[in-house]
Image (cartoon, coloured by chain):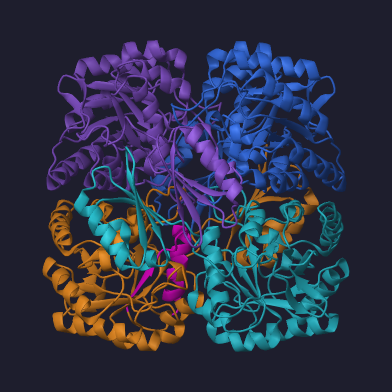
Chain colours: A purple, B blue, C orange, D cyan
Amino acid sequence: MIIVLKKDATEEQIQHILEKTTKLGLKPNISRGVERTVIGLIGPEDVLRVTPLDVFPGVENVIPVLAPYRLVSREFRKENTVIKIKDGVEIGDNKVLVIAGPCSIESKELTLSVAKKVKAAGAKVLRGGAFKPRTSPYDFQGLGEEGLKYLKEAGEQLNMATITEVMDVRDLELICKYTDILQIGARNMQNFTLLKEIGKLHKPVMLKRGISATIKEWLMSAEYILSNGNFNVMLCERGIRTYETATRNTLDINAIPLVKQLSHLPVVVDPSHATGVWNLVSPAAKAAVAAGCDGLMIEVHDNPEEALSDGTQSLLPYKFGVLMQEIKQIAKVIGRDT
Amino acid sequence: MIIVLKKDATEEQIQHILEKTTKLGLKPNISRGVERTVIGLIGPEDVLRVTPLDVFPGVENVIPVLAPYRLVSREFRKENTVIKIKDGVEIGDNKVLVIAGPCSIESKELTLSVAKKVKAAGAKVLRGGAFKPRTSPYDFQGLGEEGLKYLKEAGEQLNMATITEVMDVRDLELICKYTDILQIGARNMQNFTLLKEIGKLHKPVMLKRGISATIKEWLMSAEYILSNGNFNVMLCERGIRTYETATRNTLDINAIPLVKQLSHLPVVVDPSHATGVWNLVSPAAKAAVAAGCDGLMIEVHDNPEEALSDGTQSLLPYKFGVLMQEIKQIAKVIGRDT
Amino acid sequence: MIIVLKKDATEEQIQHILEKTTKLGLKPNISRGVERTVIGLIGPEDVLRVTPLDVFPGVENVIPVLAPYRLVSREFRKENTVIKIKDGVEIGDNKVLVIAGPCSIESKELTLSVAKKVKAAGAKVLRGGAFKPRTSPYDFQGLGEEGLKYLKEAGEQLNMATITEVMDVRDLELICKYTDILQIGARNMQNFTLLKEIGKLHKPVMLKRGISATIKEWLMSAEYILSNGNFNVMLCERGIRTYETATRNTLDINAIPLVKQLSHLPVVVDPSHATGVWNLVSPAAKAAVAAGCDGLMIEVHDNPEEALSDGTQSLLPYKFGVLMQEIKQIAKVIGRDT
Amino acid sequence: MIIVLKKDATEEQIQHILEKTTKLGLKPNISRGVERTVIGLIGPEDVLRVTPLDVFPGVENVIPVLAPYRLVSREFRKENTVIKIKDGVEIGDNKVLVIAGPCSIESKELTLSVAKKVKAAGAKVLRGGAFKPRTSPYDFQGLGEEGLKYLKEAGEQLNMATITEVMDVRDLELICKYTDILQIGARNMQNFTLLKEIGKLHKPVMLKRGISATIKEWLMSAEYILSNGNFNVMLCERGIRTYETATRNTLDINAIPLVKQLSHLPVVVDPSHATGVWNLVSPAAKAAVAAGCDGLMIEVHDNPEEALSDGTQSLLPYKFGVLMQEIKQIAKVIGRDT
């Protein structure tokens, strides 16, 4: 790391910093310019996190040189991580994996009906929420275990993998019995308790980016999971919060190629939440594939007018089918498959 | 609520909406203007959350008229909520309550030493983290139960109330044994599992605003706690995330008077996190009192250079003492006390 | 528009509002619900802008029903606006138009050299800045008229249309002599003086979105130009400012299909500024085409290491060539051409 | 500045960087750590702006060490800048200067009437817009020169200084004849043409912060004015744009003490625009004084219901009077006067 000193830093202050950093096991390298003296420190940057060098007298600024994450980084692993989810279902390879289904599991019939249609169109993973994080305590909170059963049944009947969200660390065992992929929602991206417990499992996990999480924080949350032993992590960009309110969220399309450069983990995009309106979902999904994502997660509902949650952003099955055709072709243009 | 129709909405579409809303128990009131037809709906707006009227054909926009929260609103309760924390320690009345202490509980000695100094300067509640939410899995995660013991001991010895953060719903019982106020951190503002469980207790709670939570979402999270039975909720503004990176967060000073207008709950401000640098903490704290907050929470450390967390933003005890003198006088100017 | 009254609004306050609005030429329509009384107003919403109804006693909220823009809206004109720039060069039709060239015009040689390469790859418009808006007064400010000459020469020699930025209303006449399209930069999106003057011309204009402009504000700025008589306006999304600093800006990909729904004007995307790093430009450009943009503007430089501005985000000509091939194919997938 | 190399940077790449930087007149200082090689460069950082070192092969990151502004910095001038506006009216000294008046100059009578009341309450500068920057082309655009005359007359009659906004560089001469302070609005903070021209005058200037300008960009815009010769610049914080829409803008209260540390220029706060609602103006104004601002600018109107602009955020004269009393006392608490 690098310490930039104030213009008027005294020799005494400089000595204090040199002594302190040497004691911490770092090798300081002082460079006296005309306008500023700068101290470069060779050694483990981790000490920065336990010693606030920026409060030392005479210090103007402390600049870390290394990224704070390790296991998730491309430096740690050069090749793309490929996660095997189920027979014939993987993510991170040359194919773009599509996850689809209703926002919430509302009934056995709806789940199966939507599942059949998205499967026919080419989706390989079925989504559906049984425990729903709702802004209002008065809203539909999900069917719980009953919903998990419907999801599992539909998955087995159609030979699809399944994904559902975990909100409570106490539900983890239950949910693991029923689904193939655990979803950590945007609101829980920094629920470190949950991250640690999921890190101890070997289940595939989809970690959604927090609504205002930086890419660095998102990767640090993934690092929590990997550092506890679970390397089967896919990241999901689902739109971020900005000043613009014309759409529910702002899809950070730049994040897709950037995260692929920084990390070996697969990147999924959720155009349903990232836009919030059904008639923007298709253009956003196509854009995401063109930008290089490894997977998509899309909300589909037989009758959005009657949906118990997120009806506004759900696609009708036939529109989903049209989209799948286009995605297939865009994937080919950039040398991928579906 | 109000439904604005598209300019080219057909009669058939209008009839479909009128039938549907009537079936939902609402009384529609149609008004045909030159440029737009508008349908006003009299009746419970809650149906909006289960029926996405905005996906009905011909609908341009659906506008709710009521705020989505009830129990936390000034309409529900005109008078300020006053929370009794301990003998002689309350918040929400005419006095500005000051909470102070180290970021993390690092040792028995430090805790007691800082506690004595902040108590002498006028703080009535002692803060200190035993379970720390850290962005990096490699950072100091807190002393756990050992830390809780030190906090409790210091509180008892000096007759101060205590506050500490809860991150894991499974720790709730343990933490309740040791402290007077439960703190829900910014990252857990929408950890609905935690909100519901804390809602079932009668302990005073301090609910921090999420780093990018709107005021409405913050109040909705409080509504989760109140609707489960616990009305002893104080809100804490701790800075929001904006595009500006010159400070750790942006203190949303407007939120103080606005939340006091919208809600009867007490509002605390945390200038330490809201600025992130010790030399901005005092001006921000004075501004918060001038703007009408009911309480302050400030990080104080004997030796910030050695602090295990947040050293950068911790005040030295003597600076905290000076600040307390100024706060006392500003409180008087606006007709309050400390 | 709709006026929502406070729960405790008095009859006297209601009468005051009814009288005032009637006097303003509006027809009020009162609807008394259990929780709120609402007044719908039929008539021109423009009065809202000269009468602040929200300060009237008893008023909780005033909600406009109509969008504030007219001439730029899809309602005003259903078909896409097609702008003829030069023989064989238009935007807004089925083809995706590509604008490319160096950030700044640095010399006659560079301009011509880059122009030849981007032309060969398929670009039809040559870009280059002669007057540069720089954050620092100490940075390269552009070659001025000399630069305009080089741009014009290269354009004529290669039969390309040209575009350059106008910063000063006093330069307008000069710039019009040399170029085919006027660019209004992000920083000048609300330079109303400039908008009005350009509105009086018939030159094609590219209006960049301000760095934190909402889509509504962006369209209102276009409305300034159209309402002064110039309908040859294309809009340019160039990334917005968010809390994320890992990229220079955040490309708002959702804005492309949304603006195409709201307005008949063509939409161009500038992936160079929207990402700020050359190795993100190609994925972002492909995403923009997949999302339905009508044009792209891309910075290309023979030797980015020596560029006087924006070297970091400039593509090498051969990379631009590869990108053009992919764009052509993606355009075809969504039924367009290049 | 500091260049951080990629982990796999080759010797050849390193040599290329060393040669290039040496040629630019910098003295490179290489430091080879275990994880990264870092090159510190001693010499003028200005070369960074003309040479994009971050595109050199092998470079991961380039980190500037110095702030990009000079003349506006505390380093350049240790003492506070005090600007003499008129006999007995200055800003930057120990007194908090208050500027007040209507948003727009609507008539001779209103201007004089409001002026008398704000003068009586303690304001020393009269504000009023004659050229108004309006988001909509259909809104009231100001009275122009007629308005300037009314402002000047009121100022002379009451011995108050005056301030008005300049939008068009061509109006500069005209406006200078009529007013004492030139206001550069938020939308024009990076209208570099205007900044340069105003820099050539000696008139006091108030430079408003752009709606999403960083503190660094704001100071750079001030640097444009100072570097052209005009040192009579006061900065005005007027709220920034964030994701929160419950208030018109978010007052960045942290910016006040931070800018006072970074720069010697006086800082004014505009609580009217920073909140957007009259009933938040007083708390915000008191907070700003408590945080250490040098001045306030507040919109006051005799009859906000009839105001032609910004009625929603204008204070009635008697409320302004009450506020002035509180401000006076808060100023005293922090050792200042009014």
Relative depth, front residue between B244 and C298: B244
Q: Position of residue A174 (x, y in %)?
A: 38, 11
Tell me: residue A7, above or below residue A121.
below
Tell me: residue D255, above or below residue B93.
below
Residue at position x 28%, y 68% from top?
Answer: C307
Q: Is residue C177 left or right of residue A216?
A: left
Q: Position of residue C213 (x, y in %)?
A: 47, 60
Residue B323 among those drawn in magenta = no
Relative depth, front residue between C197 and A214: A214
Residue at position x 52%, y 79% from top?
Answer: D196
Task: Residue B212: tell me if it is visible.
Answer: no
Q: Quadrant of the C terminus of chain C?
A: bottom left
Q: Which residues are magenta?
A: C204-228
* Quadrant of residue C272 within the rendered picture: bottom left
Residue at position x 25%, y 64% from top?
Answer: C304
Q: Position of residue B298 (x, y in %)?
A: 69, 35
